Amino acid sequence: MSSTLADTAPRFLADYRPADFTINTVHLTIHLEDTCSQVVSELTIERQGDDKQALQLNGEHLTLVSLVLDNQALSKDQYQLSDTLLTIPASSLPDSRNFTLTITTEINPQENTALEGLFKSGDAFCTQCEAEGFRRISYYLDRPDVMATFTTKVVADKSLYPFLLSNGNKVASGELANNQHFVTWHDPFPKPCYLFALVAGDFDLLEDNFTTASGREVALEIFVDKGNLVKAEHAMVSLQKSMAWDEETFGLEYDLDIYMIVAVDFFNMGAMENKGLNVFNSKYVLADSQCATDSDYFNIEAVIAHEYFHNWTGNRVTCRDWFQLSLKEGLTVFRDQQFSAQMHSSAVTRIQNVRLLRSQQFAEDAGPMAHPIRPEKVLEMNNFYTLTVYEKGSEVIRMLHTLIGVDKFRQGMDLYFSRFDGMAVTCDDFINAMSDASGKNLSQFKLWYSQSGTPVIKAQEAFDPENNVYTLTLLQQSPVTRNQQDPQALHIPIKIELISENNGKTPQSELLELTQTEQSWQFTGFTNKPILAMLADFSAPVKLILDQDEASLLTVMKKADNSFCRWDAGQKLLMSYVQQLTFDANYVIPKAIVNAITEMLNSGGDHAFIAEQLSLPSFDEAASLMVDIDPIALSKAITALATFIAQGAQQQLLASYQACLQEDLSRNAVANRALKNVCLEYLSLLPEYQYLVKEQYQQATDNDDVSKENMTDSLAALTCSAKNNLADLNKQLAHFEQKWQQTTLVMDKWFALNASVVSEDIFSQLDNLLEHPQFSLKNPNRARSLIGAFAMNNPKYLHCQTGRGYQFLAEQIAKLNEINPQVASRLITPLIQYKSFAPSHQKLMKAELVKLQALPKLSNDLKEKLDAALND
């Protein structure tokens, strides 16, 4: 996976121009063999301009066998071949605008550890073509604005690969000599090659159906490894819910005769929306109550929905170029979040969305890889499948939804599809459709697509008691970043509540549209200064500066009408205590927070929401709001605050813990487990209650009544043991491994737990785990479960003062650089944010980055991030 001179030049949005050629139809015949698969690609090509240009096709890691142009074989002097391009000069092309090119190539799926193009996932063949993987299967115009209809014939050994799958509808199948068989698939909808898919293997098959609103019967098929059939049932139900929701909410019906999902263990991404044949990381398909947590169930439903929703927002209307990635991803994340909010608690779902944004995306915005949701410069496209493009992109869509309203947003979606169905378009095309449908001028709003960084909103309050006028002034400022020197004022929807503390009135809700650098609003009718609750529903992805005292925040926690505002006020209080303790370990925490938490526990409200209220800001959330971070002091501060709360509210925590014992998968039981396990996390800090951890682990993992075993509770108990390095930890980890050693996804959890142990011998444990017979860096899930879990979940030892944590992480990234650069690039994120930390840590982190930058075969995936970090 070394970089070559030909592929190290960056690409720029401004350089986009339409292709000189397009491809109208593709006929593929693929003969599958482990080390030498043959691909015959027959392309009908059409020249787009009047000038006769050379035809350049992308291709990497291919062996070219033959080229046939309009039934005439081309000799080697009639084309040029490089590591990345096949060029047929204009002089070798026919004069006619239309011609047929047949390309025969050979590839080695077995050795494709990058898992791009065609590769082996265990015993099965599988593909991943987004963003630029199809060029590893055959030479092609590998860009999303070239859309063709595909017919694919797959040939393989019948005994080893009884299922041969590809896009569209099955149109033919049959037996061949030497125990071979074939299946031919035809997809009638033109698509870019990134949506091509092929899977071949021996699976268990779960079948069902869905009747569309127009009465069409769609076959639903989910393929899983042998023995996992029952674990696919939740995924099937989630798919049917998603199809019904998209019809009801957006009037969007499925368009093929069959919808297939295949679950594989070796996969770089969560899932891929290939037309009619979704390929999923098995962690987002397989679940049962014993081996999956409540979060697993939620995530499976959400990812199934996300990939299904792509059928329209991504497949039927796709991106003109990869700089427009947020056109499909930001919009589809917004859609899957809306779906999840309707399926579950909307307040809790929104809070969890915001936690991810604040803990991870805000850090990305503040780091060396800061980029707009529509980037303008890219070296390695895989590096821009980011939280900015996805999560911040969805927040931009949410702001649009807030500004124009539900009905106008639906009208805008309808107009978008009527204008662009079957086309590859831009973010501007989407915004223009929304503007035309709503009648709202969104020209300033478009700046969200071109500006990077997290805007900061400063709120200033004034109250005139003589005239009963409350004035709110908002100032906005976007940061200067490496690609943005002069940021402009953005169009920002700010939802607020004004709370009259003493008169018992319902809080007054307002939607303010901030469009200037500084803007003021006046509100009348208040006899006393109201208390301000800002960013209801987190109406914009911004940081807020608002000077409010403890009493005001406690009032918002109790009296705000908006659930997010109540939660956020509590988080601000908790965050302020964490920051104080980070800078002064002797800081005396006010007892008011314990009283507030006691009231929450006694309130009888939604247990899932209370669990979120009780959850402390994570290390990453706190770090995103700080500079020159002392990570050791920050870790101690979070623990000190948790211990203070546990000591002060122990009786109420214990009572709530004991009141929340339910084992089923109902919504109430899920909420009860969420609250119970937050309570356990607090109580496990106190020696007198650590017996509860042991009891819960035994009941959830080693119960005489197997039906009462529960992975959510089992992992919660183990996590408490790992965080506190409790006496029974090693015994519990050994038991857990013995019990689940044959279940791949649960073993991923076991590796992650081991990596999260807060213990001085963590590095010897990690070295042992690298040699574990079930560990392999070639499996992305397993690499993330050990290396990623250590980097994300063990800040105390990642940031230990000797630098050993940084060294360990960098050593594994160096290995992954040559095995799977995409995974390596994802894991380097904590290191490239080194400038956020105190100078002593910066020095240690930077030293590891410099070593990585000097690797002799540095992939583009790492090079782009390292150059940005070290040259920032």
Image (cartoon, grey):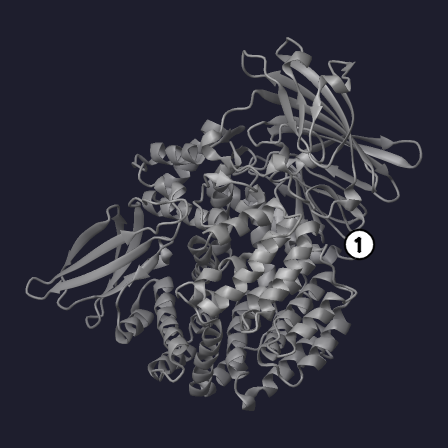
Residue at figure coordinates x 60%, y 60% from the top left:
297
Where residue 470 sits, quadrant-wise, is bottom left
276 or 478, which is in the foreground? 478
Screen quadrant of the N terminus:
top right
List x then y, in percent, for residue 689. Answer: 55, 88
Specify the farthest residue to the top.
95
- Direction from residue 382 to residue 502 in the image, left or right: left
Residue at figure coordinates x 46%, y 76% from the top left:
633
List x then y, in percent, for residue 123. Answer: 81, 49
Residue at figure coordinates x 53%, y 34% from the top left:
318
- Report the residue marked by disc 1: 226
Residue 701 visible in the current orientation: yes
Specify the farthest residue to the left.
466
Indicate whether 418 appears above or below 212: above
List x then y, in percent, for residue 209. Answer: 67, 43
Indicate whether 556 appears above or below 43: below
Indicate whether 802 appears above or below 156: below
132 or 303, which is in the foreground? 132
List x then y, in percent, for residue 612. Answer: 45, 69
Amino acid tagged 1: Lys
How busy is the neighbourhood of tag 1: few (under 14 within 10 Å), some, or many (20 plus)?
Answer: few
Secondary structure of the residue carrying numbered label 1: loop
